[in-house]
Amino acid sequence: MNGLFNFLQSIGAFVIDSLASLGRSVSFLINVLLGFKEVVLRPSLLVREIYSVGVLSLLIIFFSAIFVGMVVSLLGYTILVDFGGEESLGLLVSLTLVRELAPVLGALLFSGRAGSALTAEIGLMKATEQLASMEMMAVDPVRRIVAPRFFAGLISLPILTIIFMAVGVYSGYLVGSEWKGVDAGAFWSQIQNKVEFRHDIINGIIKSIVFAFVVTWIAVYQGYNAMPTSEGVSRATTNSVVYSALAILGLDFVLTAIMFAS
Amino acid sequence: MSNTLIKIRDVYFSWDGKRDIYAGVDLDIPEGKITAIMGPSGTGKTTLLRLIGGQLKPTSGSVEVAGQEIPKLKRKELYLARRKMGMLFQSGALLTDLNVFENIAFPIREHYEFSESMIRDIVLMKLELVGLRGARQLMPAELSGGMKRRVALARAIALDPFLMMYDEPFTGLDPVTLGTIVSLIKELNDALGLTSVIVSHDIGETFSIADHVCILSEGKVMATGSPEELKNSDSAFVKQFVNGHPDGPMPFHFPADEYTQDLLAGKDL
Ligand SMILES: Nc1ncnc2c1ncn2[C@@H]1O[C@H](COP(=O)(O)OP(=O)(O)O)[C@@H](O)[C@H]1O
Ligand SMILES: [Mg+2]
């Protein structure tokens, strides 16, 4: 009896805690979004963050895209060739990448490279009282520090995803045509005929925008709410990557079901 | 008798809703003087400064600074009020990606559209006050603890505040630097006509410059008065605190079960 009561009580406490932290993170998000005006008025802040969030993630996105494109092309070829359908290789490579792999892997890599760095940076600024000192200098750290980083992430990931798509498809083409001897004309014409800009490419980009929003939100929120100790910052960084990965994969299923299932 | 700049009335505050950090504190801070807030570590001295700066809101009670009720201010008004408050953080809290010059220029650039040459003049003036004009190009990582605190001090007075708050300004400094900081606080207070609030538990340094001392413990004001008055106080608590006796009304032990019982119980960790 007592055990059951404790069990119910702990469920209740868990639900209340979860709702409270959801509420905190939403009100934090609203504050960040209110910083949009300041970001527009001072584009130099945004440009700096786009450099450290986006440009510095280019390399890992670029090389991952090359390898992923090659692997998809190679695996696709070995399957398609059994049915004599290797002309469809272009279609297979481009659809897999555009609809699924570029947005999802791009976002996962982005959260590992840029999201974790954002969390650690903001968390450290909190632990060393830099954020509190800004508040006392009458500078709102949410608008001055967090908002530019959030919008930089929101802009960078979709662009990185588009780069992932292009590089991936091209490296898939190189493997298919240069190594496996698939006809180049067939490869590209299949893509041209069957990949729809609105349905496939736009939906892939929409996915990446949703992921960018969620990943950057999680990253800055975890940093801003880290316990102001070294242990707290390291835990926040881990949480940032783990929660981002779960959110990306969960949302990916929902979005895929909405966009492509019918 | 000078005016009262900060009036704290019947303030209650708690972090978690269970343990009260403050339970009905009344405190007056006179204008133009150096007031020291003292108390054992963990009594909530830093918390008090953050209540004054509006970074925290009291559960109940009133915090009035220069006639403004801080917890009731709207966001905009609060940010305006903070421009006139300077705070020296324990760690210095310099922005690590900016050099000394840019750290001090930071609040000026954020709030005013001054020309570069004007910003330069203001920054060099503030640096001269703390004796670090020559260190303007250094990064915070290249500074010693004492220099960091002096740069942070220059930054805190960059917007010409009327109120300066110091959080443990004497902790962790070598004796020479300590002396510099002590006289700097005194000089700035008199030269700039500031009101200073020092939070500290270092009796010697604090008593040497404070006009007015306030000892906090367990969420209440335990004693107030000039340093002389406190040194000659009859209260057992004040005697223990001022002389640093390990035992007295302020217990050495964190509240716990009876010792032998605790040892014999052998479980429940
Ligand atoms: N961010 C926080 N969250 C929860 N409790 C806190 C926080 N900051 C301080 N405390 C608690 O409040 C009490 C007072 O802290 P503080 O004001 O820093 O004391 P002092 O500066 O006098 O050493 C401490 O017991 C501390 O554990
Ligand atoms: Mg403290």
Image (cartoon, rainbow, N blue to C red):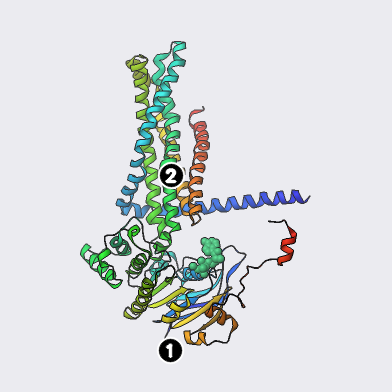
Residue at numbered disc 1: B1
Which chain letter matches label 2? A
Q: Position of residue B240 (x, y in %)?
A: 57, 79
Q: What is the three-letter code of the residue carrying label 1? A: Met
Is the residue B40 above or below the residue B223 in the image? above
Q: Are marks 2 and 1 in contact (CB under 8 Å)?
A: no
Label 2 to label 1, Cα distance in Å? 56 Å
Identify which residue, A145 or A211, lies in the foreground. Answer: A145
Give residue A115's mark: 2
Q: Residue furthest right?
A: A1
Q: Can you tell me whether the CB of the residue at mark 2 lies under 8 Å from the nearest atom of ligand 1?
A: no
Give residue A231's mark: none
Label count reads 2
Q: Secondary structure at mark 2?
A: helix
- State the residue at coordinates (39%, 14%): A87
Q: What is the three-letter code of the residue carrying label 2? A: Gly
Q: Secondary structure at mark 1?
A: loop
Q: Find residue A196 and report its image quarter.
A: top left
Q: Position of residue A139 (x, y in %)?
A: 38, 62
Answer whether residue A101 is visible to the viewer in this image.
yes
Q: Position of residue A62 (x, y in %)?
A: 35, 33
Q: Find residue B4 and report its image quarter.
A: bottom left
Is the residue B234 above or below the residue B196 in the image? below
Q: Can you tell me whether the CB of the residue at mark 1 lies under 8 Å from the nearest atom of ligand 1?
A: no
Is the residue B209 above or below the residue A25 in the image? below
Which chain letter matches label 1? B
Tell if the residue under mark 2 belongs to the same chain as the one under mark 1.
no
